[in-house]
Image (tube, rainbow, N blue to C red):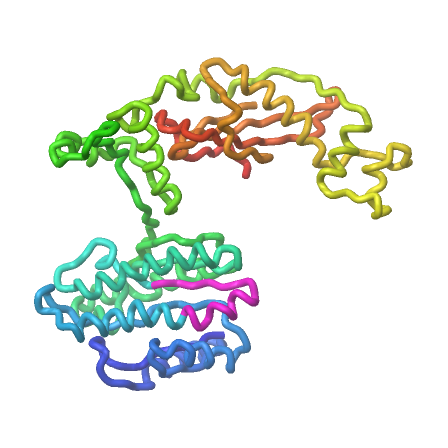
C-alpha cells in the first residue's frame, strides 16, 4: 500500500498537475498494489500523512524524494532561488517526517529515507543552493537515526543518479535510460525492510551499482605545548602530518569525534607537544599486540558451595516470594540448581586472574571503563580506549558447560596502532 505524492510542477517548481501522481498510482494498481494519490506540497507535511492514514490506517515508511532545481552560479543565486530550494528539499523533508514521527514511534516501527545527491556530498558548479540543501538532508538523517533508534525507527540517506524530470534537462536520453529509477528502487526497498538493520548510513546508487560512504579523518597532530600558545607557524610546521591519512580513523559518532580532543588535552597536559601516534611509557600496551592475540590464559579451578549460586540468584532478582524461584534459592529443594547465567561467575574470575598475568601488558583495573559478558582473541584500538576481547570456556570435568566472551575497555590506553574492529567478537 502506497501514498504517492507529487505536486506535479515542472523541474523549477512552477505549476501544478495531478497527472504525475495519478500515473504512478495507476501503474501500482495495474500490478495489483494499493495506492492513493496526494497532490499537496511537501511543505504541507501533515496533509500528506493524513492522506496515508485515512487510506491505510498507519504509516510505516517515508521516502523523502521531492525536489526542484534553480541552478545558478553562486553570485547569481537570488534569495528566492536559495529559499525555494531549501523549502522543498530540506524543510519539506523535515515537515513530512515530523508529521509521521509520532505514528511510527507509537507503533515501534518506522523506516525513513532521505534523498541527498552527489552534488551535496562533493559540490557541483552552479548548484550551491541545491548542494547545501542536499548535504543538510544528510545531517538531518543522521540525527533522526540517533533519536529514532530506541523506537525501531531507522533513517538512511541515498544519493542516487537516476533519470527523472530533473535530470532530463541536463542528461542526454541514452544516459537517462541507463540511469533508470528501477536501478535505485531495490536499494530503497531493502533499506525499508523490517529485517534490515542499517541505520544512519549513506549510499550512492545508480545504474545497478551501490556503494556505502563513510567519513575518514587523518590522525592529526598536536600543534602546541603545555602552557604554550598555538601559533600559525606551528600549524605550518605540522601541516603535512595534519593532512596525512596514514592510520586514519573513521569516526562514526560525535562521541568518537570529540574523544580525540580529550586524548590531545591529556597528552598536552602530561607531556607537552607530543605526536598523536606516540605511545606513552605508561601505556597499557608495551609490546606488540600481535604476540598477545590467540594466547591461552591457562586453566583455573573454580570451587563453590550452594551459597554462591544462591547469592548470585538473589543478586539478579530471584525472589523467595515466587515459588518458581525456590529451586535457585533453597538448597533443600528437590530441584535445586544454578541459574544458567551463573556460568559467568567462574568465567569472570578466571578472566581477571589471567589477563593481569599477560606479558607485555601493564593492566590497571582501575582504568576499566566497562565490562560485560561478551581465550584472548583480539586487542583493538578504539579512539582513546583499549579494547580487549577474551573468550572463556568453562568445563565440568571434560564436559563443556558454558562459553563466555568478555569485552574490556581501558580508558586512555588507545593510539598504539591497533585495529578498530574485530571479527572475533561475538556480540
Q: Position of residue 425 (x, y in %)?
A: 52, 34
Does residue 187 appear left or right of residue 375 in this picture? left
Please tell me which residue lies in front, 65 or 150: 150
Position of the C terminus by quadrant: top right
Does residue 279 appear left or right of residue 101 in this picture? left
Please tell me which residue lies in front, 3 or 85: 85
Q: Quadrant of residue 176?
A: bottom left
Magenta stretch, main secondary structure class: helix
Q: Position of residue 127 (x, y in %)?
A: 17, 64
Which residue is the extreme one toward the front?
A: 227
Which residue is the extreme one toward the left?
A: 75
The residue positioned 73% from the left and 34% from the top of the image is: 312
Q: Is residue 303 above or below residue 421?
A: above
Q: Is residue 152 above or below residue 37?
A: above
Query: What count of labels does the image hold?
Result: 0
The residue positioned 29% from the left and 31% from the top of the image is: 247
Does residue 233 appear left or right of residue 224 in this picture? left
Q: Is residue 153 above or below residue 227?
A: below
The residue positioned 49% from the left and 64% from the top of the image is: 110
Please tell me which residue lies in front, 234 or 165: 234
- The part of the chain drawn in magenta is 97-114
The residue positioned 34% from the left and 61% from the top of the image is: 183
Please tell me which residue lies in front, 155 or 359: 359
| Residue 112 among those drawn in magenta | yes
Q: Position of residue 411 (x, y in %)?
A: 44, 30
Q: Is residue 31 above or below residue 344?
A: below
Q: Quadrant of residue 311?
A: top right
| Residue 408 among those drawn in magenta | no
Does residue 106 appear left or right of residue 115 in this picture? right
Amino acid at each position: 500500500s502506497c501514498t504517492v505524492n507529487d505536486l506535479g510542477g515542472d523541474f523549477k517548481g512552477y505549476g501544478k498537475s495531478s497527472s504525475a501522481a495519478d500515473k504512478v498510482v495507476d501503474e501500482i494498481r495495474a500490478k495489483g498494489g494499493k495506492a492513493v494519490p496526494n497532490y499537496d506540497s511537501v511543505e504541507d507535511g501533515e496533509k500528506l500523512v493524513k492522506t496515508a492514514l485515512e487510506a491505510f490506517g498507519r504509516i510505516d515508511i517515508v521516502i523523502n524524494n521531492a525536489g526542484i532545481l534553480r541552478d545558478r552560479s553562486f553570485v547569481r543565486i537570488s534569495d528566492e532561488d536559495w529559499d525555494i530550494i531549501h523549502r522543498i528539499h530540506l524543510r519539506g523533508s523535515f515537515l513530512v517526517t515530523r508529521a509521521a514521527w509520532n505514528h511510527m514511534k507509537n507503533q515501534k516501527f518506522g523506516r525513513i529515507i532521505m534523498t541527498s545527491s552527489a552534488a551535496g556530498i562533493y559540490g557541483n558548479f552552479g548548484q550551491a543552493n541545491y548542494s547545501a540543501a542536499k548535504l543538510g538532508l544528510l545531517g538531518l538523517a543522521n540525527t533522526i537515526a540517533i533519536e529514532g533508534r530506541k523506537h525501531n525507527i531507522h533513517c538512511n540517506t541515498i544519493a542516487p543518479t537516476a533519470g527523472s524530470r530533473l535530470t532530463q534537462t541536463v542528461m542526454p536520453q541514452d544516459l537517462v535510460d541507463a540511469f533508470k529509477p528501477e536501478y535505485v528502487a531495490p536499494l530503497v526497498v531493502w533499506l525499508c525492510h523490517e529485517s534490515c538493520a542499517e541505520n544512519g548510513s549513506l549510499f550512492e546508487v545508480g545504474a545497478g551499482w551501490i556503494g556505502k560512504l563513510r567519513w575518514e579523518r587523518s590522525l592529526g597532530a598536536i600543534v602546541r605545548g603545555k602552557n604554550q600558545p598555538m601559533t600559525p607557524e606551528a600549524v605550518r610546521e605540522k601541516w603535512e602530518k595534519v593532512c596525512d591519512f596514514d592510520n586514519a580513523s573513521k569516526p562514526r559518532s560525535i562521541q568518537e569525534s570529540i574523544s580525540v580532543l580529550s586524548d590531545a588535552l591529556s597528552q598536552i597536559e602530561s607531556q607537552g607537544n607530543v605526536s598523536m601516534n606516540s605511545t606513552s611509557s605508561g601505556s597499557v600496551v608495551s609490546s606488540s599486540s600481535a604476540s598477545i592475540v590467540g594466547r591461552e590464559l591457562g586453566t583455573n579451578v573454580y570451587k563453590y558451595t550452594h551459597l554462591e549460586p544462591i547469592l548470585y540468584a538473589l543478586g539478579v532478582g530471584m525472589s523467595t516470594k515466587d515459588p518458581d524461584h525456590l529451586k535457585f534459592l533453597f538448597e533443600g529443594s528437590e530441584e535445586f540448581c544454578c541459574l544458567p547465567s551463573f556460568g559467568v561467575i567462574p568465567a569472570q574470575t578466571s578472566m581477571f586472574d589471567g589477563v593481569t598475568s599477560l606479558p607485555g601488558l601493564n593492566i590497571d583495573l582501575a582504568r576499566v571503563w566497562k565490562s560485560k559478558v561478551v581465550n584472548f582473541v583480539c586487542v583493538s584500538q578504539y579512539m582513546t580506549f583499549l579494547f580487549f576481547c577474551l573468550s572463556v570456556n568453562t568445563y565440568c570435568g571434560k564436559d563443556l558447560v558454558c562459553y563466555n566472551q568478555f569485552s574490556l575497555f581501558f580508558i586512555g590506553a588507545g593510539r598504539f596502532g591497533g585495529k578498530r574492529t574485530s571479527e572475533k567478537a561475538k556480540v
